[in-house]
């Protein structure tokens, strides 16, 4: 156990991924007494593609960390999309790759530098409730059998895609995840020049999901596959493929993946899978005394499985609600309403990504988009706008949007 023995605080933040650390930093900056805890000691690994898309860059800038993170990350200016019938498209974007072991430690350190206290390992066991049912902190288990009760004015649940933690907090509405993804690291310094952008590959043999190769610098690559359930089909796990087999298939349909996966001189390490919780679904977002942030609240995008940026955004939104709506006369209802209103603003974008998940179902559609965008600089610019969130994605994924795509000549 590290850190001081702390029986109480203003805000207890459980989970120190991007959502929890971003939230803790913002709260501590505002002068609140914050205790951030995690079931793991840090630095710790997190199964992820390690890709930082533009929303993550913006969130890191708000946290004062963009320069420090980018100085350590492998940066690139394009997303290379590969479609099943040979379509290729390079979408310009501000992108970077930094293994989560490093990124999450930087975020946690920044929260501590802002004044948050830290204790780990501490695992959520149960919430503490007052006679009125309001959450008043949590019972946390240390390594071994010892448990401690931490009292808090507010508790923030930032426990990621772990359904067990949501259940322990009584906030789980759907145990099944929205999808699963598997990643490993391969080392091939001779391929560093060949793979410059973040590669995402759609293929009918990967139907329902996609493969990726993200260059992490120094000839190291994060390579993986993801499978996302169709909207409303999260309970139907029958059709979900075996991800190790899907990764092997990726190696058969995409030559750089084959080179990374099959070359005995560069063995794959840390091959690990993890669930994804998407579309702001599957969990209640708040109850008196408690806010749920990040992937615990479903803040990862369906279709792409990207969630680091939105996890940080939701953590910061929760902090803002506690600081602003909770100050002076503000009570539970105001804080919850302020937080849920911020999440509601994000809903249309999540809904568009849900519809866009049909590109994973019908990968030939990616060929169509690639073919059109290569002939239309305006369309390519709009796609780049979707990625950096200056363009409404629903303009692409709606039926009229797709029709315009077909007809638009410039
Ligand atoms: C294979 C894979 C690839 C991905 N690739 C990308 C990508 O390239 N880019 C991207 O943006 N997103 C990616 N994602 C999604 C991204 O990982 C998540 O959106 C992001 O990690 C969510 O952040 P979070 O802070 O909400 O949760 P997490 O990062 O999961 O952090 C939750 C923390 O809570 C702790 N915790 C859990 N339960 C408890 C408990 N009971 N008590 C105490 N602590 C607890 C955990 O130890 C963890 O540290 C990927 C996901 C997967 C599975």
Image (cartoon, rainbow, N blue to C red):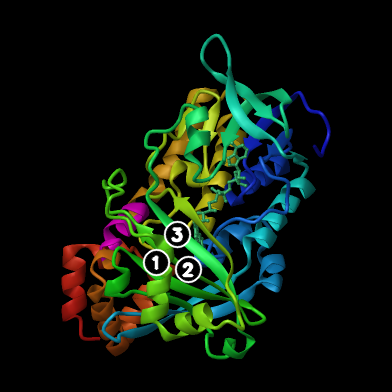
Q: Is residue 278 magenta?
A: no
Look at mark 2 in the image and give the residue it sits on: 224
Farthest right residue?
Answer: 4
| SS of the residue under disc 1 | helix
Query: Which residue is located at x 58 percent, y 35 percent?
Result: 156
Where is residue 311? Give x, y as percent. 53, 50
Q: Position of residue 92 (x, y in %)?
A: 46, 80
* Residue linked to disc 1: 245
Mark 3 CB near ligand 1 (8 Å cut): yes
Question: What segment is highlighted magenta in the picture?
Answer: 349-358
Lower position in the chain sequence, tag 3 or tag 2: 3
Dividing the picture into quadrants, the one containing residue 249 is bottom left
SS of the residue at dot 3?
strand
Q: Earlier in the sequence, mark 1 or mark 3?
A: 3
Dots 1, 3 in contact, CB < 8 A: no
Bin the neighbour count of mark 2 within 10 Å (Cα to Cα): few under 14, some 14-19, many 20 and up: many
For the residue pair 326 and 360, the one nearer the viewer reads as 360
Q: Nearer the viewer, residue 181 or 380?
A: 181
Residue at figure coordinates x 44%, y 64% from the top left:
244
Q: Is mark 2 within 8 Å of ligand 1?
A: yes
Provide the residue designation for mark 3.
181
Tell me the distance, in whole angstroms, between the alpha carbons under discs 3 and 2.
7 Å
Q: Position of residue 181 (x, y in %)?
A: 45, 59
- Residue 400 visible (yes or no): yes
Q: Are marks 3 and 2 in contact (CB under 8 Å)?
A: yes
């Amino acid at each position: 156990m590290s850190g001081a023995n702390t029986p109480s605080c203003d805000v207890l933040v459980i989970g120190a991924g991007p959502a929890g650390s971003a939230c803790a930093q913002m709260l501590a900056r505002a002068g609140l007494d914050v205790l951030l805890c995690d079931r793991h000691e840090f630095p710790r690994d997190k199964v992820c593609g390690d890709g930082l898309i533009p929303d993550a860059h913006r969130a890191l800038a708000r946290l004062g960390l963009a320069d420090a993170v980018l100085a350590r990350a492998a940066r690139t200016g394009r997303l290379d999309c590969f479609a099943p019938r040979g379509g290729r498209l390079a979408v310009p974007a501000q992108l970077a790759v930094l293994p989560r072991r490093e990124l999450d430690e930087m975020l946690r350190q920044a929260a501590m530098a802002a004044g948050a206290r830290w204790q780990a390992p501490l695992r959520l066991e149960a919430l503490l409730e007052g006679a009125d049912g309001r959450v008043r902190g949590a019972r946390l288990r240390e390594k071994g059998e010892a448990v401690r009760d931490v009292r808090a004015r507010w508790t923030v649940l930032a426990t990621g895609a772990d359904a067990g933690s949501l259940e322990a907090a009584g906030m789980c509405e759907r145990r099944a995840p929205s999808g699963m993804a598997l990643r490993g690291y391969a080392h091939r310094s001779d391929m560093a020049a060949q793979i410059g952008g973040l590669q995402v590959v759609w293929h009918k043999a990967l139907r329902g999901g996609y493969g990726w190769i993200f260059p992490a610098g120094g000839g190291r690559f994060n390579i993986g596959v993801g499978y996302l359930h169709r909207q409303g089909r999260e309970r139907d796990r029958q059709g979900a493929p075996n991800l190790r087999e899907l990764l092997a298939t990726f190696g058969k349909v995409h030559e750089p993946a084959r080179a990374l996966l099959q070359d005995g001189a560069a063995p794959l390490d840390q091959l690990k899978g993890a669930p994804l919780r998407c579309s702001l679904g599957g969990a209640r977002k708040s109850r008196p005394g408690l806010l749920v942030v990040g992937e615990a609240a479903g803040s990862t995008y369906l279709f792409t499985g990207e969630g680091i940026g939105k996890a940080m955004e939701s953590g910061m939104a929760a902090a803002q609600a506690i600081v602003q709506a909770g100050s002076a006369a503000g009570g539970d209802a105001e804080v919850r309403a302020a937080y849920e209103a911020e999440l509601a603003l994000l809903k249309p974008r999540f809904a568009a990504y849900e519809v866009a998940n049909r590109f994973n179902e019908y990968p030939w559609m990616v060929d169509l988009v690639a073919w059109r965008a290569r002939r239309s600089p305006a369309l390519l610019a709009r796609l780049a706008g979707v990625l950096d969130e200056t363009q409404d994605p629903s303009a692409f994924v709606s039926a009229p949007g797709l029709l315009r795509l077909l007809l638009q000549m410039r």
